[in-house]
């Protein structure tokens, strides 16, 4: 009997209870061998970032130690040896996601942050009974829980929690932050970008910069929000984007993994079509399939444009509204199956959109609408880009080109509509 496909399952423990599982636990070994103080992994949406972070939480968390080891029996990390499994359940872990802190105004977003961090702190109320935690910290903790903290106290909440965990356990803390850039995109789209950046700069900076309580941190997101905005003065940040070779196979499915899935599910005859529809991404030096679409295909036994319907594309729309005729022509070249040579700037920030000529292609690459032909730049950060597969080509043929045509019609009407 085949195991169910894990559509929308983002908790590692739940995944291990009866769902088809692709073993990515080698990432844990890589982190133990060579982690930086702060690692940022940027990948397109729906490529498995949240599940990856949940896996790290379940492996390292001291609060889950009583049931975590059994989840890793028979997996790559256990086969790596006792020295690696010795780290299982040995760290206090703070795991949070920013993907649900969306708001149409800064006041609304700040309220959502306050509510979310309050709920996060409720998981650690045992710290209030710890004789090893200082009483003044407990009072500040209680303010956060009761949502009575001002913005300054709220922006220091992660540093506070990490200090209390260090005092209680006598061990440094692992910090895991999923979708760190989701509120930044919302703020940019709705006109309160600077307020959001200032808050996150303090929230993340106090937790990540010169913090003796930090063992290491892993962050995920879609875009790299430039070091000069949120991560200013953070010298220990290691950014691993789709152009990086470090950890290039830990998010998304490799060709070997999809071939094994097809064999296990008796669908080896569909591999050529699966490759045409969902393969084609190039992360670092590895060929990657879109995992969301592959899982949906195996569940439904039907090809389709699964990925496009999973969320909005506000950034993409804004970028295309600012695209000039030369870039529209280049996008048509891509749709015809050819490559284009462009300069990329991974340090682009939201305020650069419309000013930085490389922003369109950089963001199309990082959000999964384009891919590189190689991880190596030809010269001066110039790369060859292409559309990765049939699913994404369908998206261009509908959403993106229709949007550009509508803009062209609107411009034509503006120029000529009153002449009849």
Image (cartoon, rainbow, N blue to C red):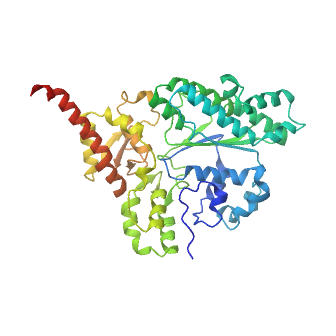
Image quarter where the C terminus lies is top left
Between 213 and 54, the residue placed more toward the observer is 54
> Which residue, as the protein is rendered here, is positioned at the far right?
131
The quadrant in which residue 350 appears is top left
In the displayed structure, does residue 259 sit left or right of residue 112? left
Where does the image place residue 3, in percent across and percent down from the top left? 57, 70
Residue at the spot 23% in from the left edge and 33% down from the top edge: 410
In the displayed structure, does residue 95 sit left or right of residue 352? right
Image quarter where the N terminus lies is bottom right
Q: Is residue 286 above or below residue 244?
A: below
In the displayed structure, does residue 304 sit left or right of residue 77? left
> Which residue, as the protein is rendered here, is positioned at the far left?
420
Q: Quick check: can you spot residue 349?
A: no
In the displayed structure, does residue 20 sit left or right of residue 381? right
Residue at the spot 42% in from the left edge and 50% down from the top edge: 309
Between 90 and 401, the residue placed more toward the observer is 401
Residue at the spot 42% in from the left edge and 54% down from the top edge: 281
Q: Is residue 10 above or below residue 255?
A: above
Where does the image place residue 78, in percent across and percent down from the top left? 70, 63
Where does the image place residue 214, in percent across and percent down from the top left? 72, 38
Total labels drawn:
0
Q: Quick check: can you spot residue 49?
A: yes
Residue at the spot 40% in from the left edge and 71% down from the top edge: 270
Where does the image place residue 16, in percent across and percent down from the top left? 65, 63
């Amino acid at each position: 009997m085949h195991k169910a496909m894990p559509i929308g399952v983002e908790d590692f423990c739940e995944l291990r209870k009866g769902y088809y599982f692709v073993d990515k636990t080698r990432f844990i070994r890589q982190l133990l061998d060579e982690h930086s103080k702060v690692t940022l992994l940027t990948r397109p949406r729906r490529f498995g970032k949240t599940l990856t972070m949940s896996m790290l939480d379940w492996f390292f968390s001291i609060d889950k130690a009583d049931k975590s080891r059994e989840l890793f029996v028979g997996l790559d990390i256990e086969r790596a040896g006792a020295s690696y499994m010795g780290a299982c359940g040995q760290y206090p872990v703070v795991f949070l996601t920013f993907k649900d802190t969306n708001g149409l105004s800064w006041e609304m977003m700040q309220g959502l942050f306050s509510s979310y961090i309050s709920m996060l702190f409720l998981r650690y109320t045992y710290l209030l009974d710890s004789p090893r935690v200082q009483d003044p910290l407990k009072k500040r903790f209680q303010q956060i829980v009761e949502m009575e903290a001002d913005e300054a106290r709220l922006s220091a909440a992660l540093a506070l929690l990490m200090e209390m965990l260090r005092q209680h356990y006598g061990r440094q803390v692992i910090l895991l932050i999923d979708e760190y850039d989701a509120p930044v995109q919302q703020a940019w789209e709705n006109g309160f970008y600077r307020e959001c950046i200032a808050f996150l700069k303090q929230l993340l900076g106090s937790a990540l910069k010169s913090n003796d309580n930090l063992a290491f941190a892993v962050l995920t997101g879609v875009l790299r929000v430039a070091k000069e905005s949120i991560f200013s003065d953070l010298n220990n940040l290691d950014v691993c984007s789709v152009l990086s070779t470090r950890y290039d196979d830990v998010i998304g499915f490799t060709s070997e993994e999809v071939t094994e899935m097809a064999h296990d599910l008796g669908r080896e005859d569909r591999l050529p079509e699966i490759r045409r529809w969902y393969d084609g991404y190039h992360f670092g030096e590895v060929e990657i399939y879109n995992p969301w679409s592959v899982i949906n295909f195996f569940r439904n036994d039907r090809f389709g444009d699964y990925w496009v319907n999973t969320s909005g594309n506000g950034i993409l729309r804004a970028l295309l509204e600012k695209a000039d005729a030369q870039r529209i022509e280049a996008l048509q070249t891509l749709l015809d199956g050819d490559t284009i040579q462009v300069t990329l700037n991974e340090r682009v920030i939201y305020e650069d959109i419309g000013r930085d000529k490389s922003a369109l292609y950089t963001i199309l690459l990082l959000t999964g609408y384009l891919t590189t032909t190689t991880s190596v730049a030809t010269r001066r950060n110039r790369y060859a880009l292409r559309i990765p597969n049939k699913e994404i080509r369908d998206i261009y043929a509908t959403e993106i080109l229709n949007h550009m045509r509508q803009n062209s019609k609107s411009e034509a009407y503006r120029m000529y509509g009153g002449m009849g």
